[in-house]
Amino acid sequence: MKESTRLIVIGLVAGFAGGAAFALLFFLVGLALLWAVVSGVGVFLASAYLSLRTPKRVYLVADGYDKKAVETILTEGRKKLRELDYCYVQVDNIEVKKKISNLYDLASQIFGEIERDPKNIKNVREFITYYLDATVNIMTNYGELSKDASTPEIKEIMAKVEGSLDTIKTAFEKQLASLHVDDIWDMQAEVALLEKTVKMKELLESKSKQIEKI
């Protein structure tokens, strides 16, 4: 129920309670008009106050997640997807562009599954908030390094990143497959591989900062 609709309902209920109290006291009990009005207003205010203080019921769409929480996570994920799309634009290597495009499509499908069935959010929260973020950071730094791949060291790092994209793609595919069969993906099986990717992110960031200082 929308907040505006909720307030209207509270007002109507409180008004009915106040009117009923006035009618009872004035017509049946015979209380003086002034006191009946005062009593009716008091009942109206008390009823409205108690209704407003009553906590709104929160409907969970998954264990520990309500609709608003799911929408917030999806919004963050969509933002990271836009950043990944920007990485695609910044990279010149055709093969790398294809792999980024594949990752983008897989992540989009994962978000689509969450929108279709929000209960899936509990299975992919870590994927959205950690691994997708790490992938975006890696590709962002890769794009920066590719502008000045003038040393063997930088070229070696870029080659490692390019090789890691297949590993990341496999992880994305397994995450999507787990949603299709409605199973909880045990990400521990992929942590060892993805940890290398995350460490590579830190290395890339370090090299990018070195280039900026030059």
Image: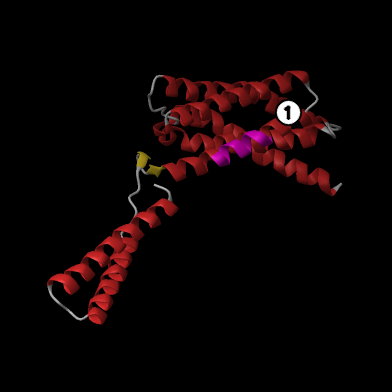
Asked whether, in this view, residue 33 is left or right of residue 148, the answer is: left
Q: Position of residue 84 (x, y in %)?
A: 67, 33
Q: Nearer the viewer, residue 188 or 6?
A: 6
Above or below residue 23? Residue 68 is above
What residue type is disc 1 on? Tyr
Q: Nearer the viewer, residue 44 or 179?
A: 44
Of 42 and 189, which appears nearest the observer?
A: 42
Based on the picture, tell me whether residue 80 belongs to the magenta stretch: yes
Name the element at disc 1: helix
Query: Residue at coordinates 51% horizontally, 44% vertically from top-left?
Result: 72
- Identified at 13% across, 70% down, the residue is 28
Of residues 98 and 30, the one drawn nearer to the viewer in this rendering? 30
Q: In the shown orientation, is residue 70 left or right of residue 49?
A: right
Tell me the chief SS of the magenta region.
helix
Above or below, 51 relative to 195: below
In the figure, 174 relative to 1: above or below?
above
Position in image of residue 102 (x %, y %) = 63, 21
Tell me how the rendering is colored.
secondary structure
* Residue that appears at 17% across and 69% down: 24
Residue ranking furthest to the left:
29
- Look at mark 1 in the image and give the residue it sits on: 88
User: In the image, residue 12 lies at what x, y percent?
Assistant: 33, 58
Q: Is residue 143 left or right of residue 110?
A: right
Magenta span:
75-83
